[in-house]
Image (cartoon, grey):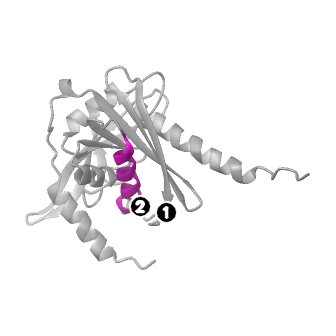
Amino acid sequence: MNIDFNKLKETQKKIAETVVLKDSFKLESVSTIAGFDLAYHKKKVICAAVVLDLKTMKIIEKKRTVSEEKFPYIANFLMFREGPPIIGTYHELETKPDIIMIDGGGVLHPLKSGVATYVGVSLDKPSIGVTKKLLCGEVYEGKIYVEKDTIKGKVKDLRGERVETKIGSRPIFVSPGHKISITTSVKIVHMCLSGNHKLPEPLRLAHRYADDLRQELVGKENKEPAEQD
């Protein structure tokens, strides 16, 4: 596969230019949220979506899709690998969620264009990115800043927050994707925490749902053929 990285970066910059980092909704009017996560098996991409009631965290709908891998894993270009399967799965949902939460970065990305931003802009939906590792930037008093170039020189741009969700576990890193602020992104993540789990419920359940199908695919391959009469 021949990859034109300059062209991909231009696409990321164009997406970043359209990002809205203000709330496009009133939180009290939000009723549903969906978590999206992916799993891989050989050249298959498994995308899982779980739609929940934001207030009760009860599952409303679940959907999984399986597609062929069309883009390799390349750091900072995850949107091109995971964005299309997530968007495709979103369109399969009967219940379109008010908010989308994705296992991946939002504007917490060197070019301000992580997978949650790509999906949010593409669908024109409020989206939140959550990662288990700090993909870029530096943390200062819980806030995450990414250095960027401006005509006045380098400045530190606020892109997200480090969030402690479980005692004894490493934190998660939250950033808005599109049409939502950092403050509200973090507030919604806290609203979605349940039990003694590190990840917010939409992502925890989506991860489990995707991994279950991956295990099923592995099991089918390892299963011995039936004996012939």
Disc 1 residue type (three-letter): Glu
- Dominant secondary-structure state across the stretch colored magenta: helix
Horizontal relation, residue 220 to residue 16: left or right: right
Say if mark 1 contacts mark 2, CB within 8 Å. Answer: yes
In this rendering, which labeled residue sits more in front, label 1 or label 2?
A: 1
Q: Is residue 75 above or below residue 138?
A: below
Q: Quadrant of residue 154?
A: bottom left
Query: Horizontal and vertical percent for residue 102?
Result: 36, 44
What is the CA distance from the residue labelled 1 to the residue labelled 2? Answer: 8 Å
Q: Which residue is mark 2?
A: 81
Q: Which mark is residue 69?
A: 1
Q: Quadrant of residue 175?
A: top left
Horizontal relation, residue 174 to residue 229: left or right: left
Q: Residue at x 36, y 20 (%)?
A: 56
Horizontal relation, residue 14 to residue 67: left or right: left
Query: Horizontal and vertical percent for residue 11?
Result: 25, 67
Query: Horizontal and vertical percent for residue 195?
Result: 46, 21
Span shown in magenta: 79-93
Query: Horizontal and vertical percent for residue 36?
Result: 40, 43
Q: In this view of the protein, can residue 105 be seen by the observer? A: yes
Q: In this view of the protein, can residue 170 be seen by the observer? A: no
* Residue furthest out toward the left: 152
Secondary element under disc 1, as helix, strand or loop, is: loop
For marks 1 and 2, the one nearer the N-term is: 1
**Disc count in the image?**
2
Q: Is residue 54 above or below residue 179?
A: above
Mark 1 Cα-neighbour bin, 10 Å: few <14, some 14–19, many ≥20:
some
In depth, the one of 227 and 88 nearer the eye is 227
Magenta span includes 82? yes
